[in-house]
Image (cartoon, grey):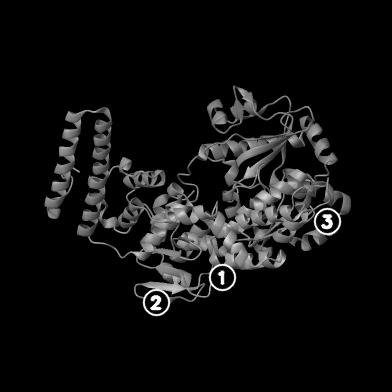
Amino acid sequence: MIEREKIEEITRQTDIAALIGQYIPLKKVGKNYRALCPFHSEREPSFYVSPDKGIYYCFGCKKGGNAISFLMEYEKLDFPTAVKKLAKELGIEIDTTKNLKYKELYDVNELATQFYTLCLSKELGRRGRHYLKERRVDVQKLKEFKIGYAPASGGLVTYMRQKGVALERLRKAGLISAEREVFRERIMFPILSVSGRVVGFGGRGIDEHIKPKYLNSPETPIFKKGNVLYGLYQSKQGMRTKNEAMLVEGYFDLLSVFQYGIENVCAPLGTALTENQAALISRFARRVNILFDGDVSGIKAALRAIGLLINAQVDVFVTVLPQGSDPDTYVHEYGVEDLKQKLSAAEDFFHFYKKVVSTDTVEQEVVLIKDLIKIINNIRDPIRFDRYLKYAAHVFDISAETIKREMSATRTVATKPQTRLEITPEEKLMGMILNAREHFPLVKNILKPHDFTEDGLRRLYKIMLKEQDFDIADVADSTGEVLKEKLLSIIMKEAPISRQALLEALVRYKSGIETKKIEAKIREAREKGDDKAWSQYQKKLNDLKKQMLKINWDNVGASSGL
């Protein structure tokens, strides 16, 4: 929504040390600053700020980024709000609509929302209004949710034609398929992004014969189900105020409790909670209260969500409803005050786990404890890991040392993040490149995207080739969070290197790649018994090694032949 050039200007002009120093006390250590991390509990400072590089990084919890991401994380702001706040302090004017990517899709979704809400209010929406009345949903109290109705007769295409919208735009937005409107005879729930733009729709059939009962928009460039939470935009302020999020399963669960004043609630879109959704919740609250249906499937969904939420560094509690109840029916039957009492008496996930999983025998309890160990073993923050470990030992009356031995013996899922955090040679090289941006023209002369074997690094390098002013704090967009952690760690640890040192590293890396290619050809020739080819490739390998020994580094460049 904001021009990239403006974002780069804002991050370039912001003194990141001065900004972060407004929130936490920083101590100068050489060129950098150090502090106790504001994002996790620790006794020894592992949080560093580099004014020269414009980034922060915590070696404990692995959080890192630039000035914008710090504001987003610390003040629980969305991206546009964080950018606007920094821009205001710098006196920079910004336009949030200019060059908006996928603007046509957002506009189409907004017009579709207008159509569906209009239909609900007209005569052709009478059945929709009747259905909502039966479900005891008060549309007037829920105006910010923009609830609508897609009539059986359709009409969206005609409405859009009158607005000058071509069918192709409707197709791209996922509103028509095979020239037929996707949503008919359904209550419509517009799905909003964190910044309040309509990115997709959910629809509930008003008759039981309509299948599927719930239907979401297909994924589009602006709508990825696993990255969005229903109701988050309307509830994010309530989450910030209470520092708690309530997680429910469905649209009606959310709307029913929201209209009775519980305004810190969100819901996944009819699927299991994802890692991205858990991370999204953690931006607005430090405690999550899971309120899923009181049946077997609801309990299983709660169990799946627990591990993801803990790894997102939030405290997890679970409110258990009577079997056969869900938040929607419960609040109407027993009232909001009764529900609030249940919420306030929520159990931490250890006690919930112990209660809902049947352990009639010692062997069943062993299985239960091992399942919990897997969840704890995924926690990256060492302080939180230690806290949960000791708490589990207390709840299940088993020594912490025994649990640690079990973790060491199994080393299943939990060891994977630790293994992945080992730095590979090409990750090390990319860290050097990001740390020496002024020498990037030299890098372009030597390396090609296919020289990186890791997909994330290859994508990142392609972006760097296109965008010379690529922000090192934006690497997660192309690499993912784990690789971002490693690269920021390298950048923070390493001092900027000289052109000569970078050149040597590039050539040695490139020659290593060529060596592996030639060695593969040699093995292939040996297996085929092709002595002539074997001899040729062996000579080529020897020549490459000799070339490396004779390199005049001052003359290496585009004509190096590597």
Residue 310 falls left or right of residue 298 = left
Q: Amino acid at mark 1?
A: Ser
The tag earlier along the polypeptide, 3 or 2, is 2
Secondary structure category for the residue under label 1: loop
Label 3, label 1: how many angstroms apart (C-alpha)? Answer: 35 Å
Q: Position of residue 415 (x, y in %)?
A: 51, 55
User: How many neighbours does mark 2 have within 10 angstroms: few (below 14), some (14-19), or many (20 or more)?
Assistant: few
Callout in the foreground (3, 1): 1
The tag earlier along the polypeptide, 3 or 1, is 1
Residue 110 falls left or right of residue 45 = right
Callout in the foreground (3, 2): 2
Residue 386 falls left or right of residue 258 = left
- Taking depth in this image into account, of 418 and 5 the one nearest to the observer is 418
Residue at the image point whose x is 57% and y is 59% from the top: 407
Residue extending furthest right? 333
Callout in the foreground (1, 2): 1
Marks 1,2: beta carbons within 8 A? no
Q: Which residue is mark 3?
A: 336
| Residue 228 seen in the current view | yes
- Taking depth in this image into account, of 9 and 311 the one nearest to the observer is 311
Q: Which residue is mark 2?
A: 28
Label 3, label 2: how many angstroms apart (C-alpha)? Answer: 52 Å
Q: Quadrant of the C terminus?
A: top left
Q: Which mark is residue 457?
A: none
Q: Amino acid at mark 3?
A: Val
Q: Position of residue 338 (x, y in %)?
A: 85, 58
Asked if 287 appears above or below 4 in the picture, the reply is below
The tag earlier along the polypeptide, 1 or 2, is 2
Q: Amino acid at mark 2?
A: Lys
Q: Position of residue 110 (x, y in %)?
A: 61, 39
Asked if 334 appears above or below 216 in the picture, the reply is below
Q: Which residue is mark 1?
A: 41
